[in-house]
């Protein structure tokens, strides 16, 4: 009976190692494919994604979502309340403020904002990517920036560079699914924070 238990434990351990190896290999191939598509020399191990959410010009907030490899690192997520616009909705100015604050915190050696990502993924198109690129260059950093473009049905369609070059991702299903998952998670996190923030504002109003 004890030998049977040992054999069973050995088999379970072997199968678990095989599953883990296969999972890691799949992730490595996925990230290598993404790197080739983006023209990066190394696969991105840490990716940061940003989205802006507002309610009628009020309660403007932003989300920072982090993926380690192909998996979300929820303990690294960060939330921002936009301070500089005073209720004036402006996605570009909001994105500039958020990324400026994020990189400034890194420069100040705030451990909550370390390390830097291998790539920035911005919810939006060419103009959003341009704003992000300008902030990165202001800090004399060399971090690739790409916008995540949606189609008419608000589904991920492509990536775009700050120079306006679109990178089709739909032909590689695994990459397409990963970018879609990152974009949806970033949007979800931003919307959740926006609703929480808006709820507090309503409860605190004269009404």
Image (spheres, rainbow, N blue to C red):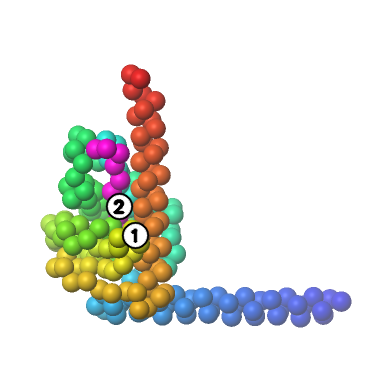
Q: Residues within 10 Å of mark 2 (few under 14, many from 20)?
A: many
The residue located at (33%, 19%) in the rendering is 206
The residue located at (36%, 55%) in the rendering is 186
Residue 188 locus on image (x, y percent): 40, 51
Q: Which is closer to the viewer, label 1 or label 2?
A: 1
Residue 19 locus on image (x, y percent): 58, 77
Q: Residues within 10 Å of mark 1 (few under 14, many from 20)?
A: few
The residue located at (82%, 79%) in the rendering is 4
Residue 164 is a magenta residue: no
User: Residue 171 is drawn in which quadrant?
Assistant: bottom left
Q: How many marks?
A: 2
Quarter of the C terminus within the rendering: top left
Is residue 112 visible from the viewing direction of this image? no
Q: Is residue 178 left or right of residue 145?
A: right
- Pointer 1: what residue? 153
Q: CA distance from mark 1 to mark 2?
A: 18 Å
Report the predominant secondary structure element of the magenta stretch: strand
Outermost residue on the right side: it is 1
Residue 51 numbered tag: 2
- Please state which of residues 106 and 191 is positioned toward the viewer in this rendering: 191
Q: Is residue 130 left or right of residue 62?
A: left
SS at circle 1: loop
The magenta region covers 48-57
Residue 123 locus on image (x, y percent): 28, 57
Is residue 188 visible from the viewing direction of this image? yes
Q: Is residue 63 left or right of residue 131?
A: right
């Amino acid at each position: 009976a004890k030998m049977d238990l040992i054999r069973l434990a050995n088999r379970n351990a072997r199968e678990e190692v095989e599953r883990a190896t296969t999972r890691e290999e799949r992730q490595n191939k996925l990230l290598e494919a993404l790197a080739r598509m983006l023209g990066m020399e190394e696969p991105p191990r840490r990716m940061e994604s940003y989205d802006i959410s507002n309610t009628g010009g009020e309660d403007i907030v932003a989300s920072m979502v982090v993926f380690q490899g192909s998996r979300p690192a929820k303990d690294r997520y960060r939330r921002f309340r936009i301070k500089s616009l005073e209720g004036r909705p402006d996605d570009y100015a909001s994105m500039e403020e958020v990324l400026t604050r994020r990189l400034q915190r890194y420069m100040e050696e705030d451990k909550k904002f370390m390390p830097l990502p291998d790539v920035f993924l911005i919810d939006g198109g060419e103009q959003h990517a341009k704003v992000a690129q300008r902030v990165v260059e202001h800090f004399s950093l060399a971090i690739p920036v790409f916008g995540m473009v949606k189609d008419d049905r608000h589904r991920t369609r492509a990536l775009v560079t700050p120079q306006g070059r679109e990178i089709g991702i739909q032909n590689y299903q695994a990459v397409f699914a990963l970018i879609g998952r990152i974009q949806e998670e970033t949007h979800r996190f931003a919307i959740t924070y926006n609703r929480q923030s808006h709820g507090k504002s309503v409860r605190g109003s004269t009404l």
